[in-house]
Image: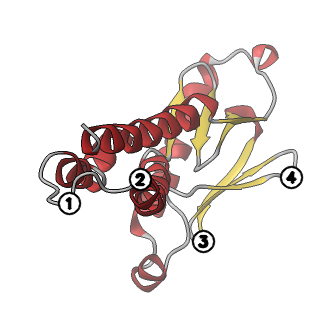
Amino acid sequence: MIVFSALGVLGPFVFAWGWIANDKPTPASDMVVTLLPLAAMVIVFGLLGSARIVGRTAGYIDVVNLVVRRRIPIGEITDVRAEGGLKIWTTSGHKIGSIAYGQSLIGQMIGYPRAKKTAVRIRDFCESVRPLVDEGDERGYSVRLRTGELLGALCLGVLLIVVTVVLNHR
């Protein structure tokens, strides 16, 4: 998702400044000042586009948001509802929301149909996997940074800026 958004947003700038710019070479500082916000936008859109909820048959659900990944054992899930976006409640008192099925004006106007369907799918998944999971083998709730995805997105943004500057100064 990050690669497609990068090619869609920054690709035309790389092409325009790198190959067909009339005023070569454009000062690198001017290019970076323009491309930096675009690269940041590509990184954020790519990370938002890759936000999701994934059920694992090992007995947990991963809620992947913009910067963090939350791992919730299905044994800890007490309730899943679509009230102002999708929310998952746990026995330890955590209330976990998802950017992928989060609060929005359009969702509020039409009643969050995607979040409702997802809540039903999560409940069904938990019921189908619960008998297969050994309760003593479950790990607890955890939160981790999406380090690999963040570094990959950052590297892609930097690479596109560097390629644009290098092509423009050839």
Q: Secondary structure at mark 1?
A: loop
Secondary structure, mark 3, is loop
User: Which residue is label 3 attached to?
Assistant: 83
Task: Pick out the residue farthest to the right.
Answer: 92
Q: Does dot 2 land on a helix, a strand or a loop?
A: helix
Q: Which mark is residue 93?
A: 4
Question: Of the residues shown, which amino acid type is indicated by label 1?
Answer: Asp
User: Viewed as shown, does residue 61 lie left or right of 41?
Assistant: right
Q: How many marks?
A: 4
Please state which of the two labelled residues, at mark 2 or mark 4, is closer to the viewer: 2
**Drawn side of residue 112 relative to residue 138, left or right:** left
**Labels 1 and 2: the sequence-earlier one:** 1
Q: Quadrant of residue 35?
A: bottom left
Q: Which residue is mark 1?
A: 23
- Place of residue 52 in the rendered image (x, y in percent of width and height, measured from the top left): 49, 45
- Sequence-earlier tag: 3 or 1: 1
The alpha-carbon separation of the residues under discs 3 and 1 comes to 54 Å
